[in-house]
Image: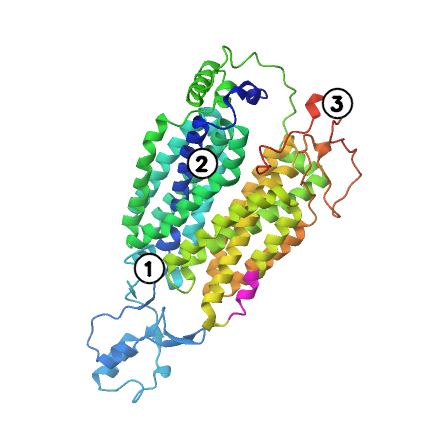
Amino acid sequence: MGDYDTDTAFLGQTGPYFWATFFLLNTVFVSTGFNGLYMVFIGAAPKHHCLVPDVNLTEEWRNAIIPVTLVNGEEVQSQCSRYRLDVVRNLSAEGYVPGRDVNLTSLQQEGCLNGWNYSKEIYQSNIVTEWDLVCDNQWKVPFASSTLFVGYLFGSLISGQLSDRFGRKKVIFVSLAAQCVSVLLQSFSQSWRTFCIMFLFVGASQISLYISAFVLGTEVLSKTMRVIFTSLGAFLFYCIGYMTLPWIAYGIREWRTLLATLSMTAVVYIPLWWFIPESPRWLITQGRVEEAEAIVREAARKNKVQAPAVIFKESEATPLFRTYTMLDILKSKNIRCITLMCLLLWMAINIGYFGLSLNTSNLSGNPFMNCFLSATTEVPAYVVSTWLLRKCPRRALLSSFLVIGGGVLLLIQFIPDTLQHVALALEMTGKFGFTMAFSIVYIYTAEIYPTVLRNVGMGMCSSAARIGSITAPYVIYLGTYNKVLPYILMGSLTIASSVVNLFLPETFNRDLPETVEQMQECQGLCNGPKKKKYVENGGSGNPSTQPETKSDLQTLTP
């Protein structure tokens, strides 16, 4: 409805109705915060070594049966091998003393045939200890993590269609229920395969919940509240859930109980069904004008304003653009190049963001505190990015924080093991940079594409983001071969993406393009024939081609 904001202007820009809806919708994002990254704890590998069965061994041989290896300059027990049990048992029976009578390096080794012994210093149990996801099966942990992000991909593809058909409110609460049931069933998984399958449903329901609540907020709230909701509200309440997760995990060290507890938190959202409204905009598109008017009149009552006798007038004929698809992006050389660069940006940022988020359990120190610090760094990042987006050009801003995020990751390899707190500080700085880039790239991309291609372009970028997040667990897995390899890969990819970003057009203080002809050229690359420039203060004079405002996409202006 092009006239919806005009027809409902009598409600004002703030008021009890808008603030109540703002906070109720934002509470939904808390659940996505602590249900999205619990894999950090339930997929962490505690200290472990081969299990030595209860056989007749002397105390010396029982202590010596696990080989000692050198890891990062420190002697540690081997995690995946032991000296052959039959040989050690014979040597023990004959009275030989390890290290004095027998050179241990000459003994043959074997795998952990009887399983593993896991430290319970941090975790009582998780999926690693439950299904022995170590050594040859270590790859199953990043695979399980990636299934969550595959679910994100599927959920993001279907959630929009479902909410367009059945309504935003219904999809939100169905997604909440699906997320609750999926996490609960996951806690009863009897095999790794079942766990991964349920993780797909967790991811699909979670992203569907996030997108549907985000859309409902943008459609129900006033322009002023909408800007706050999209630029700060949703992100900050997600951070609240993210910051809450490590404390819940700290109190519940057994993974099945942890997941069951997290799933049960959805119960608190049941009463919200009677307080969160359906989108009047969506109801109008479905021809349910009376229901839309009833919601708006209730909003007027709560805001203590008088509603007119007739709120929604006869729909005025609005100019219709032809439907654009991904094929239209491929037809234009300029749009093709811009889209390719945007895809690389979104993929690189998501690899870095989710890679660092998943890596907190591998850092030195307390994993619960590390996760909390990682979540905490996001709060100032979102606040600062909101303020900077009002003042600074997008291209320079995004490149700067990509360089910060990638640059500090490249520095980590030069930090000695004795200064682990410095490495931790650098990683948190990198997380700050990636979070800043994460929030900036959304609005920057939306401002680049014209209205007729914006949904298609953002959809393609979102798919690239999901591919990046699916890849992130495997990037972190490379740390099992060399602990600095993930940092080098993420840092290099991010620095390269910051250079690519310099070739995108600047959108700061420019009206949003409405048509393909109004879309800016990329800088220096793929420049085709110059298009006819449109005049920002009026264009052709045709109301259907006037540039739309950035108020729905740009952060709040003074």
Q: Which of marks 2 and 1 is in front?
A: 2
Disc 2: which residue: 208
Disc 1: which residue: 132
First in sequence: mark 3 vs mark 2: 2
Q: Which of marks 3 and 1 is in front?
A: 3
Q: Distance between the residues labelled 2 and 1?
A: 32 Å
Report the quarter where the C terminus lies.
Answer: top right
Q: What stretch is highlighted in magenta?
A: 408-415
**Residue 202 location, x and y as percent?**
39, 42
**Residue 42 location, x and y as percent?**
35, 54
Along the line of sight, the residue nearer the viewer: 469 or 417:
417
The residue at 55%/53% (across/down) is 433
Looking at the rendered structure, the kind of residue marked 2 is Ser
Residue 483 shows in the view: no
Residue 443, disc: none
Disc 3: which residue: 541
Q: Tell me if 372 is positioned left or right of 484 in this view.
A: left
| Image marks 3 and 1: residues in contact by CB distance under 8 Å | no
